[in-house]
Image: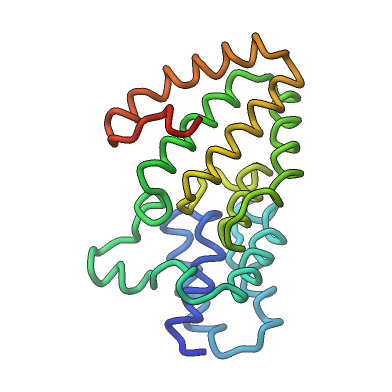
Amino acid sequence: MELALRRRVIYTGMRPFFDDLELLNAINLWQTEYSDKPKFALNVFVARSCNTPQLKAQRSNILRAIFIAMDMAEDELLADPFDEISTTGKLASLAEQGQDHKTQVFVKLLEQLFLKLNEQDEKTVRDFLLEHLNEIKTDKRRLSHLKEWFSLNTKTLAANYDLESMQKLINLSYIAICNLTGPVKADQYLALSIKETEGLSIKVGFKTHDLL
């Protein structure tokens, strides 16, 4: 595998976990010290890259995400970060890389729904979504991002999703909230979340109701 493609693999696996500076430092470390080393050296590389308590707690998840990226098709990987830097002088934001307008609205709507719940109920809904991820028909990278996001391992969902998948996830979330609070409360939470998402929806030109 050529260097640029291997760099894209590392970048794809690590992108959801790191901020721009941390990620750029990690990619530079990989390129200078680990790009010519065997696969098992990735464990040491990830350990060296995780230099904050938050990242150290995610080491196994980051390593797993890199291994998942290794099995992806080339067109499923994120663009080469060095190409982005040479063109724009900076890394593309997660939204620029991973979220089109409809996915941004989907994320906002789901986040607003989660905010209506107490901590335990939110965990129950997230666990319900994780249990039903096999119902979402998409590729390994996107399923991996969903799993990490619903598990609260990453703060941002760094990928695009087709409308059918997002509608399914909203519906599953609604079902889980109904099970916890009853349909009347679930309807109230959903209506309020739609209203709170409307500003973004108007800004990007995608109707929130298309997700329902």
Closer to the camera in the image, 210 or 62: 210
Left or right of 85, for residue 59: right
Vertical arrangement, residue 7 with respect to residue 91, above or below? below
Closer to the camera in the image, 94 or 194: 194
Closer to the camera in the image, 133 or 41: 133
In which image quadrant can residue 89 be found? bottom left
What residue lies at 41% left-to-right and 29% top-to-bottom?
208
- Residue 175, image x, y percentages: 69, 27
What residue lies at 74% left-to-right and 36% top-to-bottom?
128
- Residue 202, image x, y percentages: 29, 28
User: Is the image coloured rainbow, by chain, by secondary structure, or in one colour?
Assistant: rainbow
What residue lies at 43% left-to-right and 54% top-to-bottom?
98
- Residue 92, image x, y percentages: 34, 58
Left or right of 173, for residue 89: left
In which image quadrant can residue 41 be found? bottom right
- Residue 152, image x, y percentages: 65, 42
Vertical arrangement, residue 103 with respect to residue 205, above or below? below
Left or right of 187, for residue 131: right
What residue lies at 61% left-to-right and 89% top-to-bottom?
37
